[in-house]
Amino acid sequence: MLIVKLIEIGVCVLAAFAVLAFGAVDPLSDFILQIGSGGLLLVWFLQAVRQRQVTICTNRLFLPLLGFCGVALAQYALGRTAYPYATKVELLSMGAYLLLSFLLVEAVQGERERKAFVWFLITLAFLVSLLGIVQFFTWNGKLYWIKAVANSSVPFGPFVDRDHFAGFVELTAPFAFALVFSGAVRLDLLPLVSLFAILPAGAVVLSASRGGILSLFFGLVVLGVLSGRRITGRKSLLRIVLLVVLSGVAIAWLGMEGTSQRFRDLASSGISQDRRVSMYRDTWRIFLEHPWPGTGLGTLQFVYPRYESRYDGSIVDHTHNDYLELLADTGIAGGICTFFFILFLFRQGFSNLRQATTPFGSAFYSGALAACTGFLLHSLVDFNLHIPSNAMLFFLIAFVASAPQVKTVRTTLLTPSRS
Amino acid sequence: MVTILGFGWEATIVWMSDECATSENPRRWHRAARLEPGNAACWARLGAFEEWDFERGDLRQAAAFYEKAVAANTNSDRHWLALAEVYEKLGEISQARDAYHEAERDHPISSEVAWRCGSFQLRQGNTSEAGAQFHRALLTNPELTENVVAACWKAKLFTLRDIVELFPRQNRHYFQAIDYFLRLNEIDAALSMWDGLLALGQPISLAQAIPLVNQAISTGRLDIAKRVWRQAVEKAEWPRDSDGGSSIVFNGGFEHELANGGFDWREQSVPGVSFEFDSNSAHSGVRSMRIAFDGSSNLDFQNLVQYVLVEPRQRYRFTAYLRSQSLSTDSGIRFAIGDVSHPAVSPILTSSVTGTQSWTRTETEFTAGADTHLLKIALWRAPSSKFDNKLIGIIWVDDVSLVALDAGGKDARR
């Protein structure tokens, strides 16, 4: 239906906007995401009213996410947050992710829509990576060659931090690899899809994001394992070997020196190991002192100074471990919701993968699982879940990947009452 | 539908509030605070505006705004500090104290908080509390040392010993304090810091002690200069000449690196002249000092200098060995020995060296004046008055010595 198509396009446009708007880290971009999600939901709702029926695709993933939002809402409403305004701001972002995930699940119900979504992701990854590479070699200190960045940041592509760029690529590049591994792409499109796979991988290496490189690599290993059963025959194997070799060539050509140096020197630019360990330890202490209610969603930056054990004058806005930060913010309740979210994601994702009957289906679910795996791994050492564009993409992919193929659809008929 | 509209409304309010709060127009900040009263940053900005508007600002209003800021976010040490500062300006000392305590509770490790709390306590005359805060500040931010020393010194509530006790047990605090007192020309205070530093028993480098020695020399406090130099050389395990110690010239054979200050050679760079050690040409030992002139100017050269402490009325023999290669002009290189306390008195000059000469001994004897305590030994070249006056060539210097003589003209120390 046209409206459904419009919603899918709308979600993709918002996702692309968020990525290109420096990860949507500034308030205006965040606002556009929130208003955009509300607007799309309104469109969906009006369509449902016009049709006099509401059709909702259930997805078990909504439960823990709603539970998580419920925890945060309770913190805000009951005044159990260290800084209510910060919790409110985070709740609005979570609300936008929830709405967009819901809408995308409604819009992407068939293989055709899933294909369109995958092509959107891999094309966006390619274009953003190309931008990143060109910008890297022509760097003038400004994003898009016009917007100045703070001296302390190490940007890549449209992102103010290379680790955020890497998080974006972890979520998108595996789909291109998955299409090749699973033989789900036409022969005439194989070179293009291969390029869509190789370039982002090369860009991540060029960005020298250690967490990103390791997470992407791990994600691709997971992809390889998940795609294993699809690799039959020499042609399939040749395709994969060629892709891997070409990726290696691209990486070597783009330059390994800076990356190697970063791995050799763990304390070079960015956060030192000692600082990282102290942040983890202090955040754990925050959680131990607020185990149940947490300190309030989005309040770590404001609570952390009281627990800071290693002072260098800088402000700790995130602890570089999304899980620890989540525990500190939302306590055990939030932790349980997160646990079940991840559990349901992989359980349903693997189930969908097992049930996939087409090469594309297999590619889609294996790519999505690999993307989520790499991203969740990177969250152990970074805070990509606090970068709106990356968080949004993660939730979109997670929900679409875990949407049941045998749909459980609840339909409510809205009929005018007759007296 | 209501949820959607509510969601959109809240998102709009938050964004509009943020837009207004980041505007340059103070009127929009009021609007930002009204739109989103929970945003502490808006109230803090209003408070700062009222506090620092010297024409129309209202401190009471500033306090009210800051109070709203801390009510919205009770965990911000910055807002509590700002509130405390305003309370203090209003004379509400008890409330200021409470606000400083809140700031400390919210960020106990912060050196900024400790420094400002300490400064507050100092202004109130509570030296022990101030001292504790300053000590805490210095533990995490040694760069605050000079601020702390300056505050304590100017308040005149701390003795030098008290100030030393504020320092964590690290050299850098003491050296920063020494630098501060030297800028004030407070040599005795700097010396107290030096004594505290020695008591730490930690290794130091000679270069760190040189500013104190130099200033003591330049202000005529030769007793202090001598003591500090001796202690620094010992503490830094700086190498000394191994000639039995009869010469009072330090590093006369140029066998060791130059300290470039204190009572060691001072090499003052000048365009057209290069200094380096030469291990291929030495009168004795391993190397000599080689100075090359590039012929670009008619130099007035006194750029290799050493200060030496002498006894009044003592007779001395000065000896040095010079070697030259193609040293041009009629005005050669020689040593000039001057009395620092009587700069108007002509220096004693040795014979000069020009052209190409192998190692040549240059020597002179003199008796120090009745109140001569410090000599300046300089390798010297006066500008030539001739047309062909630009100095080019190379000079080597080695085995510079100044030996006290007894009544019989012999080395008094042997």
Image (cartoon, coloured by chain):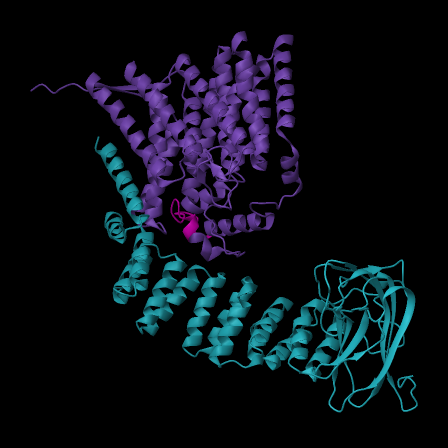
Chain colours: A purple, B cyan
How far from the left and from the top, in percent, is residue A362? 50, 15
Q: Residue at x 41, y 47 (%)?
A: A292
State which quadrant residue B412 falls in: bottom right
- Residue A47 seen from this side: yes
Q: Residue at x 41, y 19 (%)?
A: A404
The image position of residue B328, as x and y in percent, is: 82, 62
User: What is the quadrant of residue A112 in the picture?
Assistant: top left
Residue in the foreground of this view, choosing between A338 and B406: B406
Q: Nearer the viewer, residue A329 or B162?
A: B162
Looking at this rendering, what residue extends furthest in the front direction? B387
Q: Position of residue A203 (x, y in %)?
A: 56, 29
Q: Residue at x 27, y 65 (%)?
A: B55
Tell me if residue A249 comes above or below residue A295 in the rendering: above
Q: Quadrant of the N terminus of chain B?
A: top left
The region drawn magenta spans A289-302
Q: Is residue B370 above or below residue B252?
A: below
Quadrant for the C terminus of chain B, please.
bottom right
Give the main secondary structure, helix, strand or loop, of the magenta stretch. Answer: loop
Tell me if residue B195 comes above or below residue A10 in the rendering: below
Q: Closer to the camera, B21 or A406?
A: B21
Q: Quick check: B12 left or right of B377? A: left
**Percent from the top left, x then y, of residue B174?**
61, 71
Q: Residue furthest left?
A: A419
Residue A183 in view: no
As for residue B180 lying within the magenta part, the answer is no
Membership of A293 in magenta stretch: yes
- Nearest to the observer: residue B168 or residue A133: A133
Q: Is residue B182 left or right of residue A70?
A: right
B160 displayed left or right of A15: right
